[in-house]
């Protein structure tokens, strides 16, 4: 089968023939119909994460936002069958440990990260293996296009988990979103669906236009103003919840600084080699005003039905964020385009 393989960090992916996936007794093989192209793939391609022992291996297939149809099913799988159309979470739980049993499969100590570690080759490929399918395979509602599910990908589930489960965003809350790439735009749409008032912050006018179309009540050009002062001016006292979707030191600190008393910052964006996982913060002010700083990673597979329910009901529409569909041979160039933020909204590989 054809796949896009990482040979050297920062070099174009090698689109070539690779062996078919091996089927484990508890797993399934998915015929990939679509796969989102995410900034986390860019981080992996660049070789980031070494400082956290989280660097992806070489000679490896990236891609972690697939949707498709089951073509092979392991002998121990009972929840799904061949022919089912599924979404595939990137944070794959084992389904048996304490974390998985208590609804926290995204922090499973025995889990696998699809498209990021040797045990879970990714989905920039014609087919991909999904382990522990009874726990991880998410059967899709009828009538939902694979492209839209791939656009939903990790970005919407990450944004939804961050805002709904971690920050407990409520109707009427002011939510500031820093960075309007894929996960940031998803956070704008999710926050709007939860009834929040949304402020989108970015340095690109096209990204801010997409944010406004996705439901942002206010947009802020981050390189033209003092961001915390502007957010405070808009909201009166600061945001109730603020989310850093980019992972740069500047956006992280701006996010914390724009909060009101007892506000909540959620860190979603991963840092680059400039920060190497470390960002200095105003801890005295955070203590004085009881500001919460939360990390958030993906979403537990057991709660994926909440997100699919919003999609089926029309409360979320990932299709409006899709800027480009590409073939497998175009994926290397689209990853490279992320280096200077030259992508168009959410870009999706389709077969």
Image (tube, rainbow, N blue to C red):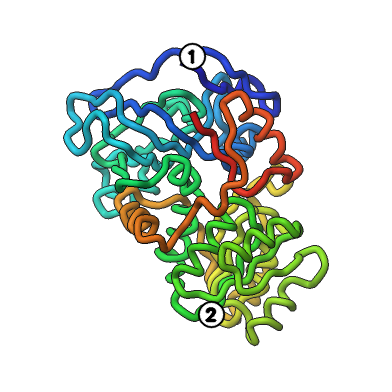
Residue 262's mark? Answer: 2
**325 vs 11: above or below:** below
Contact check, label 1 and label 2, Cβ < 8 Å: no
Viewer can see residue 19: yes
Q: Residue at x 40, y 15 (%)?
A: 20
Q: Earlier in the sequence, mark 1 or mark 2?
A: 1
Establish if 260 lies above or below 146. below
On screen, residue 90 versus residue 15, left or right, reads left
Q: Nearer the viewer, residue 218 or 13?
A: 218
Q: Is residue 117 above or below residue 238?
A: above
The answer to which of 233 and 127 lies nearer the viewer is 127
- Furthest toward the bottom, the residue is 236
Density class for disc 2 (Cα within 10 Å; few <14, some 14-19, many ≥20) is: some
Q: Is residue 298 left or right of residue 201?
A: left
**Residue at position x 33%, y 39% in the image:** 86
Residue 245 horizontal/vertical position (percent): 60, 56
């Amino acid at each position: 089968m054809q796949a896009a393989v990482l040979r050297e960090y920062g070099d174009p992916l090698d689109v070539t023939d690779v062996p078919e996936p091996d089927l484990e007794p508890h797993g399934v093989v998915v015929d990939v119909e679509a796969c989102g192209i995410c900034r986390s793939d860019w981080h992996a391609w660049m070789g980031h994460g070494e400082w956290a022992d989280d660097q992806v291996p070489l000679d490896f297939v990236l891609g972690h936002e697939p949707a498709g149809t089951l073509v092979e099913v392991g002998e121990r799988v009972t929840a799904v069958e061949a022919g089912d159309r599924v979404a595939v979470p990137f944070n794959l739980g084992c389904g048996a440990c304490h974390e998985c049993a208590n609804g926290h499969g995204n922090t499973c100590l025995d889990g696998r990260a699809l498209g990021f570690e040797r045990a879970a080759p990714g989905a920039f490929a014609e087919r991909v293996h999904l382990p522990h399918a009874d726990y991880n395979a998410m059967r899709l509602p009828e009538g939902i296009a694979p492209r839209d599910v791939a656009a939903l990908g990790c970005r919407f589930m990450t944004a939804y988990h961050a805002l709904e489960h971690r920050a407990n965003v409520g109707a009427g809350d002011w939510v500031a979103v820093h960075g309007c790439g894929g996960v940031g735009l998803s956070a704008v749409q999710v926050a709007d669906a939860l009834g929040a008032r949304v402020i989108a912050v970015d340095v690109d006018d096209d990204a801010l236009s997409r944010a406004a179309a996705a439901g942002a009540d206010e947009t802020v050009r981050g390189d033209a103003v003092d961001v915390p002062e502007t957010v405070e001016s808009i909201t009166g006292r600061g945001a109730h919840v603020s989310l850093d979707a980019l992972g740069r030191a500047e956006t992280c600190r701006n996010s914390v600084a724009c909060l009101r008393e007892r506000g909540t910052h959620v860190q979603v964006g991963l840092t680059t080699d400039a920060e190497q996982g470390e960002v200095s913060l105003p801890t005295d002010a955070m203590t004085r005003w009881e500001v919460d700083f939360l990390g958030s990673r993906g979403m537990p597979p057991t709660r994926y039905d909440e997100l699919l329910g919003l999609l089926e009901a029309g409360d979320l529409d990932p299709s409006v964020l899709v800027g480009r569909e590409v073939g497998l041979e175009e994926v290397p160039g689209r990853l490279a385009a992320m280096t200077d933020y030259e992508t168009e909204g959410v870009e999706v590989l389709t077969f």
